[in-house]
């Protein structure tokens, strides 16, 4: 028993119309924003692009606090290893900043020397 032939199998084209919420200028209704934000794991303000820097920092801080609490609950040896890794990244970042600042200082000194010459 074979399947019944469908229109597109016979060369017919079926027009596909975009849904109301699709398209380059369509926006979902405002009543859908809370559910959409929940599914995406962000705030409604973030979806709308009106989230303040303070609110973003608070969200990041809360996330960091949650992670630190999880690390604090690990066995001592695992905590020590994680902290060593974090310390290595912090030190690398500090060295990069110092190197960048040193390069900028050298560039400024070279510009001043060239201006004097």
Image (cartoon, grey):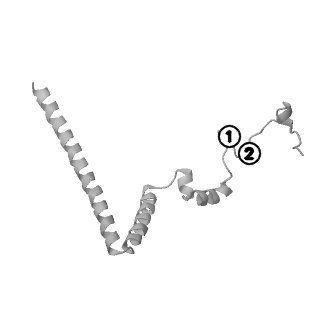
How many numbered marks, from 0 up?
2
**Residue under the point 25% across and 47% down:** 96
Q: For this view, does 4 lie left or right of residue 76?
A: right
Which residue was labeled with disc 2?
20
Question: In front: 18, or 57?
Answer: 18
**Residue under the point 39% across and 75% down:** 73
Which residue was labeled with disc 1?
23
- Give x and y (percent) for residue 9: 83, 35
The local secondary structure at tag 2 comes to loop
Q: Which mark is residue 60?
A: none
Instruction: Say which quadrant the C terminus sits in.
Output: top left
**Residue under the point 11% across and 30% down:** 113
Q: Is residue 104 above or below residue 83?
A: above
**Residue under the point 74% across and 45% down:** 20
Q: For this view, does 59 lie left or right of residue 2?
A: left
Question: In front: 19, or 55?
Answer: 19
């Amino acid at each position: 028993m074979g399947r019944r032939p469908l229109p597109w199998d016979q060369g017919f084209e079926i027009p596909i119309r975009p849904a109301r919420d699709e398209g380059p200028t369509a926006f979902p209704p405002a009543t859908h924003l809370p559910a959409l934000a929940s599914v995406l794991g962000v705030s409604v303000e973030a979806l709308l692009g009106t989230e303040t820097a303070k609110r973003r920092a608070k969200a990041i801080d809360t996330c960091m606090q949650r992670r630190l609490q999880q690390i604090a609950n690990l066995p001592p040896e695992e905590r020590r290893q994680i902290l060593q890794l974090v310390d290595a990244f912090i030190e690398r970042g500090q060295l990069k900043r110092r190197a960048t600042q040193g390069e900028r200082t050298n560039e400024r000194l070279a510009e001043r020397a060239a201006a004097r010459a």
